[in-house]
Image (spheres, helix red, strand yellow):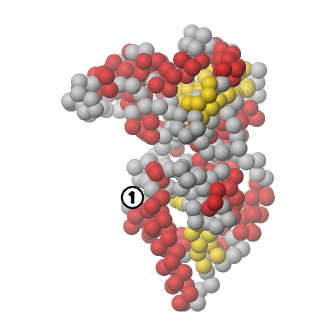
Amino acid sequence: MKKVSFLGFKDYANIMTEYAKAINKYCDGFEARVICELSHPIDFGEPHDYDLYEWDESKTGHGKRNDDIIESAKEWLKESEHIIFAEEKKPIWHDLMLNPPQYRDQEEYFSVLDHGGILDTYTRLEGWRDLRNILDLDFFTETKAGKNGNLHMYHTGSVYRDSCDFFNIMGIKHFNKLIHGVDLYRLSWYNPNDRMANDKTINERFNLYDDFKEENHLAIYTSYDKDYDKQEVLKRIDDKFDTNKILIFHAMTGKFKLSHIIDQVVGDLVKTLNKRNKRKGINIEYEYITPQTYEPIKHLVDKNSGWVPNEEIMKLKEMCHLYVDEFNPMIGYFGGSSVEALMTGNVTFATINHFEEDAMNAANKNINATDCPVIHLGANPQEFRRVMKKYMEKPIEELKEIAKNGLEWYYKTSTHKAVATKFEKEILL
């Protein structure tokens, strides 16, 4: 059995844990495990295989060191054929600048990238360095994956978004496969002939000819799989859309979702349309639900983070009809929460302006997928309101068919079986 390791800080939205489960179930001859510094702060009901530290009492950093777990993780890593590292911490590069945090000019920015590409990864990648120090293990020289050139880097979230070019050159120079969340693929250097601002191509400016491989730039959908029976979900969709009360749900799990705008837009639409329907005798009612306002679970909301156990979120998604993931055109993509909404039969909304055609082609490689069913909310709150109003006013039968189409797309792209196919054909074999 070939060993695979996912390595990170605390595992963005438990995505690596889901990928590991996919590999374990559907990739014959491989066993994957997840190694993190800390457990995920949200209770997803799926713990990591190895958490190297306990949280401190304030849940802001390291508490007790788990020495026995660290030794077990170290032995697993040594024998791993593939190590997939998720950098969840900011890179260290401000010391390369003349006057941090501002660049003097574009050439200074390029020179920082030049230096970053030739310096030791443990000097520049904070999460990589910290894990090496905790485990007392050189991933390049003391693991099978490192010796065989199978150290891969996985990018998702704001850390990559904020420093993508630095990660790009480090990844191309020092790692093998570079795996991206679908919205972040556009920021990668998957096309080395793209022009920089000085009109040189990426290859020309940074001399990547010997290091760059187009096939090493990958995009993979977020995967969640609750082992729901598809026919049961279809029946549940039929049952819950047999109603005259439409439930609209939003889970506030981070500032980047701009939940305050969602509250304002959706909350106002619900009030406006309910008043209009009552006045006109239209027998359709709307209700807007969040964990913070829904009476049966509001007592479970963590006072510091605003989070609730994921199993409660899933119950609400199974119950509701429309789900709004986030409204943030700067981020411009949907995440795991939207995938969960699709798999539970919701008409699902987000800002997906950064889900570009090249990214879609890369994500759909080796799987047969149709166009993404997540509905784009537009570039500003006014467009958001128009889009939501349009769909809230659609006939319930039409909404039901949209939910069923979303479920079909989920089964083609985001189940464990679908992403396992991607990992097997594009990374592991």
Residue drawn 20% across the image and 30% down it? 104
Relative to residue 162, is residue 331 depicted above or below?
Answer: below
Number of numbered discs overlaid on the protein picture: 1
Q: Indicate whether 279 appears above or below 170.
A: below
On the image, the x and y values in percent for residue 148 come to 60, 13
Quarter of the picture containing the N terminus is top right
Residue closest to the far front: 57
Task: Please name the residue that numbered disc 1 is placed on.
Answer: 379
Q: Is residue 42 left or right of residue 201?
A: right
Closer to the camera in the image, 155 or 414:
155
Residue 61 position, x and y percent, is 53, 34
Q: Is residue 160 visible?
A: yes
Residue occupying image coordinates x 53% and y 90%: 279
What residue appears at the point 27 percent right and 24 percent down from the top-left corner? 97
On screen, residue 105 versus residue 272, left or right, reads: left
* Residue 223 % position (x, y): 64, 43
Nearer to me, 325 or 131 = 131
Q: Is residue 407 visible?
A: no
Question: Which residue of the protein is positioned furthest toward the left in this rendering?
Answer: 104
Circle 1 SS class: loop
Which amino acid type corresponds to the residue marked 1 in the rendered image?
Ala
